[in-house]
Amino acid sequence: MTTPVTELALALLDTDGLPASMRDRALIASITSTTRERTPLAPNFASDLGVRTRSDAEVYLSEVASMQGIDVDSYLRRLEPDQVLQVITENRKTAGYVEATLDALLNFAGQWTLVAAIAPALLAEPEHYGTGELTYAAAALSAVKNPAARTGFTQAVDSAATSFSWSMATIRLAAWLIKRANNLDAGEAILGDREARIDALVRERRISCGDGEVMKGVGHNLRALIWTKRKNGQEANASLSLARTALRSNGLVCVGASERNRYYAQSTVNQIQLEAMQHGFDTAYEASEEHLTWARESDPTSVTEALSLTGYMAYRSNKLNTAEAHLVEAISRLELEGAPTQLSAVRKAMIATLHVQGRDEQALLLLDQLQRDPAGLDRYRIAA
């Protein structure tokens, strides 16, 4: 049995000229089994280690569907929490069904409130669900600021089937405590216990030394946020230095190189942002250019964020030609990637760059595009 979200995904896949990002997301949403691979064009917002909630999926779906002549509301208005919960309950013994359904609701349709409405029922019977399903439930509760999210993230830790899955589930729990509950002491305690267990897993030969270092590196990166919130820049820098060293480790078995590179990129971005706060934008700009070079060579999935960051740092350090070049490239990539939130931020930086140069007419045109075309779909309309 499928939900209206699956039907909507199939309807989109049946149209011509569908943007690649929506094609990838709709393809995942059209199947009712767990997705082993997803492209960078189909991000998993709910498993984000920053436990952030974004409207990207909902906005992009609405804009693309409208362009393709499909009425999104005719599908989504048929989504009722009780009916969705019934479908999940009836099919929870089917491998991958529940995780795929929640994935489609959040990452394809952006239905955070709906998933939050059914999440308590899932948390009431955690024995029926795995780490993926419980993470989705907890993320949705976090999105609506429901403190029961802590229970969901804890249950996701308890249900983890592998060392790496446990490691990342624990990070999400700590991240929620630090970022959403502002309970720094509790988050710090969890990170300390996590690091001790990772060391034990290495000694027991459950994971490789390289796996352990990368897992600990992710923890060091989050610990830097604790020190930043405590206004201790020296300790924050030390934690980020530890993170970046650990996240360059090799000899990986349980952790993929692409995952390691992604986490390394995150820690480097955090380091650059801290550099800007402590030493100014000129120094941070130089570091961001180095990071952009690394991303182009080692982690293509990090290039867009690196361009956005470097363009902004160039603007703030008055290197306006360089800022414009990086921001133009970032905008082009973000339009292809279907990322409205980041696209809006980069367009605003570009508007500021144009304004400082006295190019207000171009700035106003971009401002109009920002308001009229939040998903960056003009390129597809023009091509059609």
Image (tube, rainbow, N blue to C red):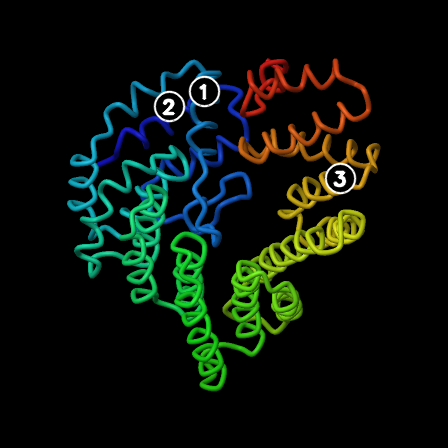
Q: Earlier in the sequence, mark 3 or mark 2?
A: 2
Badge 3 is on which residue? 316
Q: Which of the pair 63/278 is nearer the observer?
A: 278
Q: Residues within 10 Å of mark 1 (few under 14, many from 20)?
A: few
Q: Which of the pair 165/178 is nearer the observer?
A: 178
Residue 224: % across, % down: 57, 63
Q: Quadrant of the C terminus?
A: top right
Q: In which quarter of the view is residue 262 placed?
A: bottom right
Q: Residues within 10 Å of mark 3 (few under 14, many from 20)?
A: many
Image point (41%, 39%), residue name: 107
Left or right, residue 96 beside residue 218: left
Q: Which of the pair 185/17 is nearer the observer?
A: 185
The disc at residue 15 is: 1
- Classify 276 as above or below 24: below
Q: Amino acid at mark 2?
A: Ala
Task: Find numbered disc 2 in the image and state the secondary structure of the residue it sits on.
Answer: helix
Q: Amino acid at mark 3?
A: Arg
Badge 2 is on which residue? 11
Q: Are marks 2 and 1 in contact (CB under 8 Å)?
A: yes
Left or right, residue 2 beside residue 256: left
Q: Amino acid at mark 1?
A: Thr
